[in-house]
Amino acid sequence: MIEIKIVVCIKQVPGTTEIKIDPETNTLIREGIENIINPFDAYAIEEGVRIRERFDGEEVEVIALTMGPPQSKEILKEAISVGVDRAILLSDRAFAGADTWATSTTLAKAINKIGDCRLIILGKQTLDGDTGQVGPELAQRLDIPFIGYASSILEINRNKMKVKRLMEDRYETFEINLPAAISVVKDINTPRVPSLRGKMKAKSAEIPVWDAVRLEAHEDEVGLSGSYTQVVKIFTPKIKHEIKMIEGSTGEQVEQLYKELKELTVIEQEDLLFMEIKVNKETCNGCSLCKKVCLYDAIEIVDGKAIVNENCVFCGACIEVCKLNSIEITGLSEEKKDFSDYSGVCVYLEANGDRITDVGFELVSEGRKLAGQLGVKLSAVAIGSGIEKSTLGAFQYGLDKLYLIDDPVFSDNLDDIFAKALAQVITRYKPEIFLAGATWFGRTLIPKVAAIL
């Protein structure tokens, strides 16, 4: 009996880094180019096989999953040749033209159809789309934790795993509950070459094809009809800085600028009151399941009832295990939103520790030009711990308004809590356009926010 299922999501891509775009259709020119497994997905396959090898004495199955045309069977057979147990192809004309959202929807339906999958592994991004959005959106669709850019799996069992991830200038280590999804970088392993036995197995392997009917997918959920985005133009942006000089010592400049901006009410201090975790005392039976899965010692059992303390980071693990549905996070609406009254441009000021990163300030400069062209206001959202003073530099690039969430709960870059907070700010203040940097954290965070919205 299979005890643990690991799904590795892979993609067929052009076998070249010199990708050309058709200027008329804004799509990839694929003629005359050999198709291969996306290089980053090779590391995902290898890690899935290595995890199976860790579980000595347990039945672990590694399943390769891809969405694409019929010829994608070849990359699935290649995955089997290096150790994958079986593979599934998602192929249907209805899936054509899918953006990352529609792709993640299709993959999520397939994973739910497979059933009881404990771990989903993806490459950090693909050579063709290069967005890195499918992993975070897929996790959000499945309502499971996601860690991007994993460089090492330090520990893993059926219920938990400890993951180290690579960022631009540091490493971060997280312990998360399973089921979960991760995307991996090439530092995580060295992919093996196919063995003769593996090649023979792959040659005789039968690859099942699942279509929209098998997935019970409606036309408006998948493919072009289920896509929210369409590429209308591709170009290389030009970066320009606009700088204003302020006289006086550094301390005098900061204090004076902060004082004036406060008086102008262009900085609004946000809090976490719009997010609250509640326990229904009428239905809670004090079973302690929530306390056992909480990684932050945020739950206590008092007088036979669960109590949530200030350590809570709103990760949602307790909600997933509560069989009586006695725990809920309020402040995040699940209703489909009406975006018709959204207006303005908003920028995400990403923080590293107590400092705003350079990419955030660069985005304010570009956002100022975009807001000027549209005749709207430019705002920014900053989320972190101890970042208040470092956000002031954004105003010299033309920022009109800053929404600041400065709280110790954001001292760690926990994707889920950042995503929930940012989604709530966007819902409250309704910017029509939201800009964020293509950093490794930003590429993980923003797809999750889009999936929540």
Image (tube, rainbow, N blue to C red):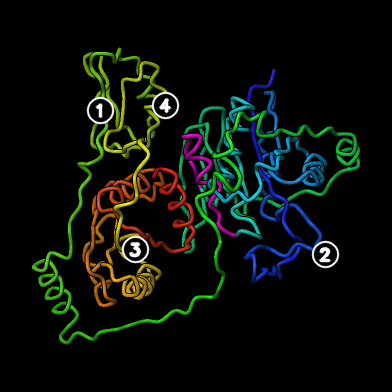
Look at the image and say whether residue 134 sits in the magenta stretch. Answer: yes
Of the numbered discs 3 and 1, the one sitting upstream in the chain is: 1
- Residue at the disc numbered 4: 320
Marks 2/4: CA–CA distance: 48 Å
Residue 154 visible? The answer is: no
Of residues 208 and 291, which is closer to you in this image?
Answer: 208
Identified at 18% across, 63% down, the residue is: 267
Mark 2 or 4: in front is: 2
Of the numbered discs 1 and 4, the one sitting upstream in the chain is: 1
- Residue at the disc numbered 2: 32
- Residue at the disc numbered 3: 347
Identified at 36% across, 24% down, the residue is: 290
Of the numbered discs 1 and 2, the one sitting upstream in the chain is: 2
Q: Badge 1 local density, few (<14 within 10 Å), some, or many (20+)?
A: some
Q: Which residues are magenta?
A: 130-147
Identified at 36% across, 50% down, the residue is: 412
Answer with the quarter of the image where residue 208 lies: top right
In the structure shown, which secondary structural element does the residue marked by tag 3 occupy?
A: strand
